[in-house]
Every structure is written in C-alpha cells, then in structure tokens.
Image: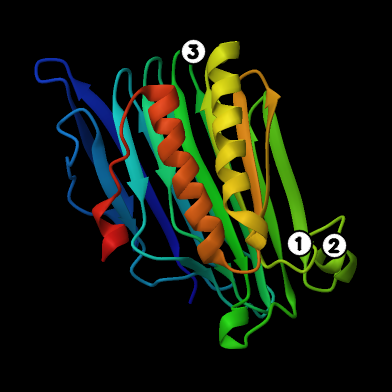
Amino acid sequence: MSWHARLDLRYQRDEATQRSIARFSHDGPLRILQSLYPEGGTVCHNVLIHPPGGLVGGDTLDIGVHAQRGSHGLITTPGASRFYRSEGELAVQRTRLVLDEGARLEWLPLEAICYSACRAENRLRIEAAPGAELIGWDVTALGLPGAGQPFERGSLLQHIEVPGVWLERGRIDAADTRLLASPLGLAGQRCLASLFFVSGSPIERARREAALDTARAIAESVGAQVAAGVTSPHEEVIVLRVLAPVVEPAMQLLRQVWQAWRAALWQMPASTPRIWAM
C-alpha cells in the first residue's frame, strides 16, 4: 500500500505583537510539532515529522510552505528522511517554498538517505518575492557505507529550482560508475550537499562578496575531509556545494556556514534548533 501525504504550512506575522505564527493543514502522515520560540517571537521554529520514517515505491510527499509578508520561519526535521528499496514505482518528495515580500525562511531538513535499489525523486522549488530571503540546504547520502550497505542499485533524480533564476537538476544512477567514481564526478564520495541563499531581489555586491568570502574561509578550515566550493550563479543566489565520504563532515560544514551567513547577511546569531541536540 502506497502513501500520499500532504502538508500545507503557513507563516504569518502578527502586527500587534511582531510574532511569527505557524498554521498548518495536512492529509496523511505528515505534520509539524508545536511551534517554539527560542529567539523570541520574531522567528518561529518548527519540526516537520513523517511518522513512517521513509518512502517506498509509490509513496508521495507534498510539502508546501508559504511565508507571508514580514514573517520568519525555521523548519527542520528530527532525523534523516529515507528512500527505501522499490520494486519499480517511484518514491517522490515535492517541496514548494513560497516567500512573500519581506519574509524570511530557513529550510534546514536533515539528510535524505537513498538506500540501494531505491527509485527516488526529490524536488525543491523556491519562489521568493522582492525583498524576501531564504537560507536553505539539501543533503543526500547514497547508501549507508558505514553500515556496509553501499548504493549498488537504483537511482535518484535531484531537482532544485528558483524559477527563471537558478536550476540544478541531475540524475544519479548506481550503474553510472563514471559519475560515481570519476574525479570529474563524485570521486567516490557518497554524500553530496548544497547550502543556498536565495533572495527575491539582487543581492548587493558587498553582501554577496562577504557571504562568498566567509564560506570560502570556513571551507578551507575544515581541511581535506570534504571538497567544497561556493559560487554565485545569479545575482539573487549564492550556493555552497559539498562532497564528503559520509554525512557528518558535510553537515558540520553546512551548519558552520549557515551560522556565519545568518550573522553576515541578517545580523542574527545562530539559534540551533533544539531537536538537533537530542
């Protein structure tokens, strides 16, 4: 039996209290936990949960987030999402993040693990109005090498899009040894990750250069354990790309740069989601 779950999450700003408030509706096993305010009322922290813990062939998750004017939401997950073995059908996760003018959103889910023999599609679409800004990341682990479960069969379609601005789309097939092993491909690494800053307006040159320099300095400090590079492919986007043998060093780098970008771009200290410490 396949599952089709849907979550619609909306952030709105209460003008009287300046508090960001989350409201949601859902169908199926997909929802958010209680809103938390570790930074005061300005930023609303939420944990997105999918009780089954993973997707098999035929399952679909549809996640929609709408940050209304002036609101600020931060979303993470309690653990990795998982694409399990499929007998033929696709397992699909579709996420659409919409930001109105002046809204801020932080999309920080933990990694997606692609088990051997999965057939997965992971799609992320970001729509930012002028004056809106987002910091988000996407982390994928191919197999479980530490547990002796390599990614030997199956495929993943990865799609990240800011319409008309930036598109990254690629298919990883376990049979494509050139892609997986070549130094021009993944070079044998099994974790690939991207951290991105997306603005609905052109990013001022000084801000963009500061974000690029900060990310480069942090990436250089982690040494040879990860391969990383940061670019600005469009005046409204900054992207840090990371390859690592396993998730932990990649995630550590992403968190450090996320904290630095929060400070440099938003003049806000990092407030680590409580669920990460559990």
What residue do we see at 69% from left, 77% from top? 151
Which of the 4 image quadrants contains residue 237?
top right
Residue identified by numbered label 2: 179
Residue displayed at 23% across by 37% down: 44
| Residue drawn where x is 22% and y is 23% of the image | 13
Give the residue displayed 52% in from the left and 51% down from the top. 253
Question: Residue 113, located in which quarter of the rendered image?
Answer: bottom right
In the picture of the structure, the residue carrying the numbered disc 3 is 130
Q: Of the residues shown, which amino acid type is indicated by label 3? A: Pro
* Disc 2 residue type (three-letter): Leu
Q: Position of residue 103 (x, y in %)?
A: 36, 22
For numbered disc 1, what is the local secondary structure? strand
Q: Position of residue 177 (x, y in %)?
A: 87, 71
Disc 1 and disc 2: Cα gap in Å? 8 Å
Task: Describe residue 135's horizontal placement relative to residue 266 as left or right.
Answer: right
Q: Does residue 202 show up?
A: no
| Disc 2 element | helix
Of the residues tagged 2 and 3, which is closer to the observer? 2
- Image height of 208 relative to 106, above or below: above
The residues bearing labels 2 and 3 have C-alpha atoms spaced at a distance of 37 Å
* Circle 3 residues within 10 Å: few <14, some 14–19, many ≥20: some
Residue of label 1: 172
Distance in Å between CA atoms under marks 3 and 1: 34 Å
**In the picture, which quadrant includes the C terminus?**
bottom left
Sequence-wise first label, 2 or 3: 3
Image spot of residue 198 (x, y percent): 54, 28
Residue type (three-letter) at the residue carrying disc 1 = Ile
Q: Nearer the N terminus, badge 3 or badge 1?
A: 3
* Horizontal relation, residue 245 to residue 69: left or right: right
Q: In this image, 212 relative to 270: left or right? A: right
Q: Residues within 10 Å of mark 2 (few under 14, many from 20)?
A: some
Q: Are the residues tagged 1 and 2 within 8 Å (C-beta)?
A: yes
